[in-house]
Amino acid sequence: MEKFIISAAITGGMTVPGQSEAIPITPDEIVDSAVGAHEAGATIVHLHVREPETGKPSSDIGLFREVVSGIKDRCDVIVQPTTGGGKGMTLEERAAVLPELEPEMATFNTGSFNFGLFPIAERGGDFEAWEIDYLEGTRDYIFRNTFADMEKVCAMFREADAKPELEAYDVGHLYNIKYLLGRDLLDTPVHVQFVLGVMGANAATIEQLMHMRRTATELFGEDYTWSAAGVGYPAEYHLAAMCLMLGGHVRVGLEDNLRVSREKRADSNAELVEKAVALGEMFDREPATPDEAREAFGLKGRAEVAF
Ligand code: KMH
Ligand code: ZN
């Protein structure tokens, strides 16, 4: 069976706790959720952190260190912190995980775009005042990743000997990756994740996934690996099914999607991972182990991280 890598996006940095009881907040909750996701089949856990008291997205490196160390102590899953962070964080605050933790992998955002979550506030819900402000504030928010930003972060990845997971939210971002490759700022083979369904970037449709995949192959040849993250339901699993059919890898998790079916909201990341594993079985694919993914991605290994 051809293996596939499942990445579990544990808590996120743009959603707010009022959206779902299931979103893990404290370091212990995030660690438990990540270990549970791995036990359900996740190869990689993608991590943000939050202020324990309020659940507000945070860039605090002490919280990151507590989370990544807690996970590493309990299992061999690949720990993948974000350099995307959340609204209002500077590039320095976002990218500090690289020099501080020297992870095997981290996310690398390959272009700027509007990141609109304000319709969530408009739809109403049981939100704290800060959560309404945070969501409403995205009406006037640009997720900034300029060429100068990306050049800086490329150097930080090289310095930390970490492999970037290149987050592409729109077709133009693939041309940014091509530019960075041309400047020899990224190592090949690249790993590209098509992140579709964010309001302000490309839509999570099968046609747009196919368009992104075709463009990536045009630009990078066959020498790249890829995955897709569908934001929302059923996008998360429609794209996962496409990845399974086309030989890609899969991302699921509460950062991107809060439903496990039309009728049921997810109780945990593990539940979302279990559905991805079951989907894989229907296409004769089984989850890769962390070490198989380390081999496939050429990662430096757990012993080389700084946590
Ligand atoms: N929040 C996701 C839509 C990152 O953390 O660097 C994109 C993401 C990127 O997870
Ligand atoms: Zn993220």
Image: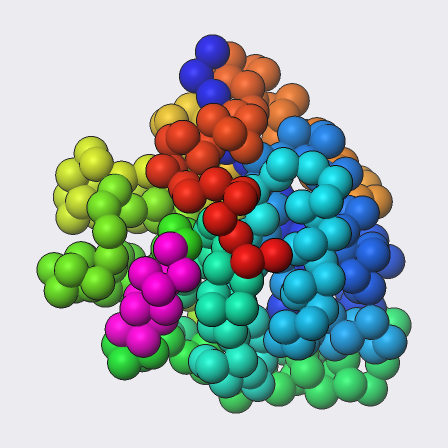
Residue 199 in the image: x percent, y percent? Answer: 51, 67
Q: Is residue 170 above or below residue 301?
A: below
Q: Is residue 114 visible?
A: no
Q: Which residues are magenta?
A: 151-161
Q: Does 156 lie within the magenta span? A: yes
Q: Is residue 70 left or right of residue 296?
A: right
Q: Is residue 154 visible?
A: yes
- Pick the residue in front: 276 or 289: 289
- Pick the residue in front: 53 or 259: 53
Residue 246 occupies quadrant: top left
Q: Is residue 114 left or right of residue 22?
A: left
Q: Residue at x 36, y 38 (%)?
A: 298
Q: Is residue 245 above or below residue 92?
A: above
- Pick the residue in front: 84 or 31: 31
Residue 75 in the image: x percent, y percent? Answer: 69, 37
Q: Does 155 lie within the magenta span? A: yes
Q: Is residue 92 left or right of residue 247?
A: right
Residue 145 occupies quadrant: bottom left
Residue 29 in the image: x percent, y percent? Answer: 83, 55
Q: Residue at x 25, y 42 (%)?
A: 189
Q: Residue at x 47, y 69 (%)?
A: 99
Q: Chief secondary structure of the magenta span?
A: helix
